[in-house]
Image (cartoon, grey):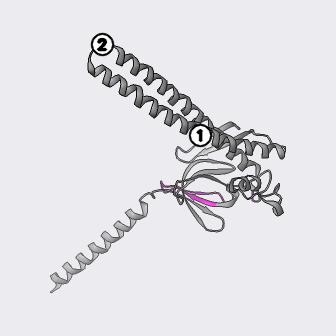
Amino acid sequence: MQLHTFIKSGLLFGMVLAFAVSNQSLAQTPAKNDVIVKRDSSRIQALITQMSYEKINYRDLGTADSAKSYIYLDNVARVILKTGKIINVRDSVLVGHVPPDSIGQYADMANLPKDKFEKSVVMANSDQLRDKYRYHHDRSLDGKTGAIVFTSFAAATLVSGIIIAGSGTSPDNKTIGNSLAIAGPVVGVGLGLIGFRNYKFHSKKAEKVKTELLRRNQSLSTLTISPNLDPFNKSGRLTLRMSF
């Protein structure tokens, strides 16, 4: 009887111990993403790309395309990294930081544009406008580069196809050459037109943002010197950054 009771007690103790060890292991398992805990206790599921003394740059995993965004540290209580490390920032930043100008400061609220993009431009603060300008400026350059590359590809395949078709007497040469001379330019010109369309689309938006910044007497570029914290490598650095 005593042996039976001892075995049952040992078995029960083993189960409790296994459960405790399992819970401890789960508690120490790194999360799949970083979490930004705001001062109002709301949370942002994020992939943090950079932290500075002023703000956190991150990708918002709560959106379908993981959009790039940022948040000023005076709105953040703490950061929980996916490694499990917790960074408390509530008491380490100056409360009340505001951007150089506020959202909607330059907008005529009684006559807001009907176009969604134009409305977002006049309602944005100048820091946000610089981000918009940089985004559309870079995308327009990508489109322009794509248009040049694919147009060059179309021309190259046309010339190559003609040369191959005209070389030798083999029917295969004519088949391959003619196919290359037709398919290459079709594909190249098609992709080149898409690139050119993207160039025009984004350059037009970049120009609207530039015009709004000039209307506010704000520069397109900002020069900042700031210390940066790399939470992943546990290192710091002083950064000189020009944004435009």
Q: What percent of the width, then of the height, locates residue 107?
A: 81, 57
Residue at horizontal 58 percent and vertical 64 percent from the top: 43
Of mark 1 and mark 2, the one earlier in the sequence is 2
Highlighted magenta segment, given as a residue range: 77-95
Farthest residue, direction bottom = 1
Residue 168 badge: 2
User: Looking at the rendering, in which quadrant would you find the N terminus?
Assistant: bottom left
Distance of label 1 from label 2 (alpha carbons): 40 Å
Q: Is residue 128 magenta?
A: no
Residue 166 lies left or right of residue 46; in this view the side is left
- Res. 204 image quadrant: top right
Q: What percent of the width, then of the height, locates residue 137?
A: 66, 39
Residue at horizontal 55 percent and vertical 45 percent from the top: 234
- Res. 169 image quadrant: top left
Q: Is residue 90 magenta?
A: yes
Q: Relative to 107, does residue 217 appear above or below in the rendering?
A: above
Q: Say few, some or many: other residues with alpha carbon within 10 Å of mark 1 (under 14 / 14 to 19 / 20 or more).
A: some
The residue identified by callout 1 is 197
The mark closer to the camera, 1 or 2, is 2
Residue 131 badge: none
- The foreground one among 157 and 237 is 157
- The foreground one among 149 and 141 is 149
Residue 47 lies left or right of residue 69; in this view the side is left
